[in-house]
Amino acid sequence: MIVISDSAAGRIKDMIAEEETPDMFLRLGVNPGGCSGFSYSMGLDNEESEEDVYLDVQGIKVVIAKESMRYLNGLEIDFEEHGMSGGFTINNPNAIASCGCGQSFKMRNEEGRPEVCD
């Protein structure tokens, strides 16, 4: 299960509406790398695979590669505005540590591929 806050859902829906390509959805994933060992991927996509898991969260089609589900189950996505800027934040109950940037995390039983942080 993935949780998307009302503010994040609103922002994602706005981003999808701005796209000229039909049938866009939110794709979430995990890649080895980042300063803590694993990094998140999050973006709009319109290409699907047989290896994908499909969810409907807040009326948003969310697609996740099956191999990433074990890292993302229970994930919470929010959108916070800070003055003139804002951004998505991720809370992952599966992570035991996160990088200061919030885009990289460490798992208890998997090392991933830690890299030097810029």
Image: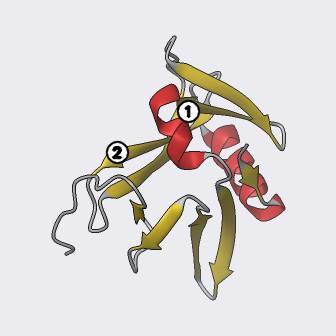
Secondary structure of residue under mark 1:
strand
| Residue 84 placement: quadrant | bottom right
Relative to residue 7, is residue 19 drawn left or right? left
Q: Quadrant of the C terminus?
A: bottom left
Q: Position of residue 7 (x, y in %)?
A: 78, 64
Quadrant location of the N terminus? top right
Q: Amino acid at mark 2?
A: Asn
Mark 1: few/some/many CA within 10 Å (<14, 14-19, 20+): many
The secondary element bearing badge 2 is classed as: strand
Between 87 and 62, the one nearer to me in the picture: 62
Give how far across and how far down residue 117 sits, in percent. Answer: 21, 73
Q: What number is the disc on residue 31?
A: 2
Work out whether mark 2 precedes mark 1 in sequence or the reverse, and give the earlier one. Answer: 2
**Which residue shows up at 57% across the image and 69% down it?**
87
When asked about the image quadrant of residue 54, the answer is top right
Q: In screen coordinates, is 76 left or right of 85? A: right
In the image, taking residue 14 as reference, residue 107 lies left or right, namely left
Q: What is the x, y in percent for residue 48?
A: 52, 17
**Residue 6 relative to residue 61: left or right:** right
Relative to 57, is 35 above or below? below
Q: Which residue is mark 1?
A: 64
Circle 1: residue type = Ile
